[in-house]
Image (tube, helix red, strand yellow):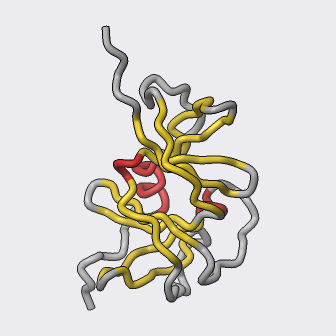
Amino acid sequence: MANPAPTAILTFSLGSQVYALPIEDVVEVAAMVELVTLPDAAPEILGVVNRRGQILPMLDLRRIFKQPAAPVSSANLFIVAAHAGKMAGLVVDEVRLVEYVNSLENLSTSGKIIRGIINHKEQLIQIISLPMIMATYLPDQVAAEGNS
C-alpha cells in the first residue's frame, strides 16, 4: 500500500513556540500595512487593514495563545488565512517555512484552538484550528465587501 502524499503546512513562531497552519488555509504572507484600530474590539483583534480594497480583520495570535502582547510595526509579517469564505490576518512573531509532514489525520487533540501536536524534525509543532479561531474571535466578521 502506498504512503499518503505529504501534507504541506506553513510554520511560524510566537516566542519560543512553533505553530503551523495547513497550507490550504493560507492565502499569502504579507508585510504589515497601516492598521486601523477599532475602539470597541476585543483585545485579540488588533484592528483592520486594507488588503487590495477589502477590509481584513487582524488577529494577534500572541494574545489568543495567552502570551504577552508585542508591539506591531511595519517590520511584522502576517499570514492572510481563509476559511469558509472568511479571511483574517494572523499576526505572528516570525513566519518560518513551508514544511511537508506525513499526515494531519489522527492528531491527538490538545484544546479548542489547537488541532493537534506533531513531532517534526525533532521539534514539536502545534497545528492550529483556523475554523475554531475564526468562530471564537470573529463570529461577526467585518464584511470584506467594503460596505459603508
Is 145 displayed left or right of 9 in the figure? left
Residue pushed farthest bottom? Answer: 148
Image quadrant where residue 84 sits: bottom left
The quadrant in which the N terminus is found is top left
Q: Is residue 120 above or below residue 14?
A: above
Q: Is residue 44 above or below residue 8?
A: below
Q: Residue at x 52, y 85 (%)?
A: 35
Image quadrant where residue 123 sits: top right
Provide residue 103's location: percent of width, then percent of height. Answer: 44, 28
Provide residue 129's location: percent of width, then percent of height. Answer: 47, 45
Provide residue 21's location: percent of width, then percent of height. Answer: 47, 48
Q: Nearer the viewer, residue 69 or 74?
A: 74
Is 90 displayed left or right of 110 in the figure? left
Q: Residue at x 36, y 17 (%)?
A: 3
Residue pushed farthest top? Answer: 1
Q: Residue at x 41, y 55 (%)?
A: 135
Is 55 displayed left or right of 10 in the figure? left
Provide residue 97's location: percent of width, then percent of height. Answer: 54, 51
Q: Residue at x 66, y 35 (%)?
A: 124
The quadrant in which the C terminus is found is bottom left
What is the tally of numbered marks visible in this picture?
0
